[in-house]
Amino acid sequence: MTDRTHQDPSEPAPSPAAPATAETTIPNLLPDRSLLRWEILCVLALSLGAAAVSATITFLGVLTAPESMADQTANLIRSRAENRPWLDLSFQLYAVVFALAPVALVVYLLHRTGESARTVGFDRHRPWFDTWSGVLLAAAIGAGGLVVYLVSWQLGLTRTIVPSTLEGHWWEMPVLILQALKNGVLEEVIVVGYLLHRLGRLGWSPWKAVLASSVLRAFYHLYQGVGMFFGNLMMGLVFGWFYLRYGRVMPLVVAHTVIDIVAFVGAVYLIGRFDWLPM
């Protein structure tokens, strides 16, 4: 039997291994432009693109209803099993968890292309910057959004928004906070971080991508009325500018979560106690 542990003198010596480089260790895993477009369309069809279509159909119903827009209500978080609190709680938690599935898909797709959540700044590497900048953004956008809502409602351009119709169970506040966190993660990771990053890979200019992202955000809020359409369009432009400037989506998640917590929880205690708040 031939001993294969010794090199046969008649065989050429093996060439030395090529040195490891970024090109050899991290290949370009991005799909071609056509597949990348399909990836974006599929992600949006499973998440906020579908929400934009639903909101547009709802808005058509609002326009054709006999009541004025301000006399109609938009319920953001409603009971899913009236008079059955434990079943209702189960449905609420189910809705929060599975609404985040597209975010998990986006993170997976980033890893498949040799990137990660850190590529779009969805990580914990800058906690202080993310927190204070997010809170400042929330204060500015939240105050502006409230003004837009009140003025547009007075002009009959926005439906009366009812943040919560839960029945005051012990779990109402935790569920409202979880819903706010879900909204912040879902919207900002997909509509800002993922979408701007992928559109940039397709060769879109930064501000063209920001405009597309902002228009999408405006459309999936269209069910609330014309005023909130333009309010969310402006919010999208500001958030898009921030992302282009700092390359991090986490402060936007913080800002959006804070805005929604104030809106959801505050509405429970404030609506009906102040005449200037629509109800």
Image: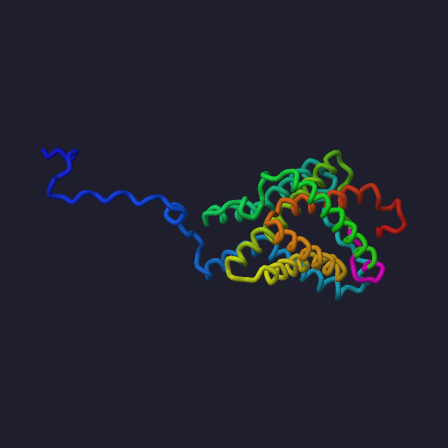
Q: How many circles with numbers are drawn on the protein?
A: 0
| Residue at (71% x, 36% y) in the render | 174
- The answer to whether residue 11 is visible is yes
Q: Quadrant of the N terminus?
A: top left
Q: Is residue 256 above or below residue 213?
A: above
Residue lying at the far right of the rendered structure: 275
Magenta range is 152-161
Q: Is residue 156 magenta?
A: yes
| Residue at (23% x, 45% y) in the render | 15
Residue 10 is situated, as x and y percent measured from the top left of the image, at 11, 43
Task: Please identify the quarter of the rendering in which residue 96 is found.
Answer: top right
Q: Is residue 256 above or below residue 7?
A: below
Q: How is the image coloured?
A: rainbow
Task: Say whether residue 214 is left or right of residue 228.
Answer: left
| Residue at (30% x, 45% y) in the render | 18
- The answer to whether residue 78 is visible is no
Residue 270 is situated, as x and y percent measured from the top left of the image, at 84, 44
| Residue at (63% x, 38% y) in the render | 127
Residue 46 is situated, as x and y percent measured from the top left of the image, at 56, 53
Q: Is residue 247 magenta?
A: no
Residue 168 is situated, as x and y percent measured from the top left of the image, at 78, 38
Residue lying at the far bottom of the rendered structure: 64
Is residue 214 or residue 15 the one in the foreground? 15
Task: Say whether residue 200 is left or right of residue 180.
Answer: left
Q: Is residue 88 above or below residue 67?
A: above
Task: Say whether residue 110 is left or right of residue 212.
Answer: left
Task: Please identify the quarter of the rendering in which residue 45 is found.
Answer: bottom right
